[in-house]
Amino acid sequence: MSTGEEQPRWALTLYVSGASANSSAALETIRRICDEQLVGQVELQVVDVSDKPALVIADRVLAVPTLIKRLPPPLRHLVGNLADEGRVLEGLDLAPLKGAGPDEGGQAPP
């Protein structure tokens, strides 16, 4: 029986290309999200596409950086500018929908 305290587990794979600027920025953003939003409940695998081409093919990665969210469902592929934390949070369903609240402009209430 569940105690109600169990947190959902997250499984993320970030595909990068060496130490390119885009890949470095993506890694920094994803690690910050994991450290701040998913503390203790995420497994992050970072894959350099030149080191593991078989994984690139298996996961059908066409561009880097690419973040694959395996858990929780649904499976998602986020591709492109992963330095934009807000975009990544929305892609992972961790950010509230725009316009959902009274302070939709991102402003703190007075």
Image: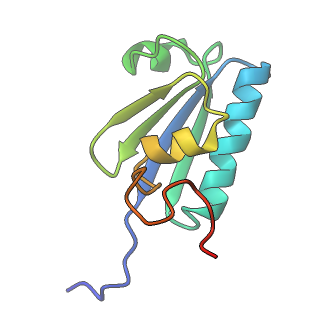
Residue 39 placement, left or right of 58: right
Residue 36 or residue 61, whichever sits in front: 36
Query: Image height check: is 4 above or below 13?
Result: below
Give the quadrant of the N terminus: bottom left
In the drawing, does residue 32 fall left or right of residue 47?
Answer: right
Q: Where is residue 80 drawn, in percent x and y? A: 56, 21
Q: Residue at x 43, y 50 (%)?
A: 98
Whole-percent x, y for residue 38 in the image: 54, 62
Residue beneath the point at 63% across and 36% down: 84
Residue 26: percent from left, percent from top: 67, 33
- Figure disc tally: 0
Split into 4 quadrants, where in the image is the C terminus? bottom right
Q: Residue at x 55, y 53 (%)?
A: 105
Instruction: State which quadrant residue 40 falls in.
Output: bottom right
In the foreground, 87 or 109: 109
Above or below 92: residue 8: below
Q: Position of residue 106 (x, y in %)?
A: 58, 56
> What is the image's colouring?
rainbow
Considering every residue shown, the one lying at the far left of the view is: 1
Name above or below for residue 48 compared with residue 7: above
Seen at 66% across and 60% down, the residue is 35
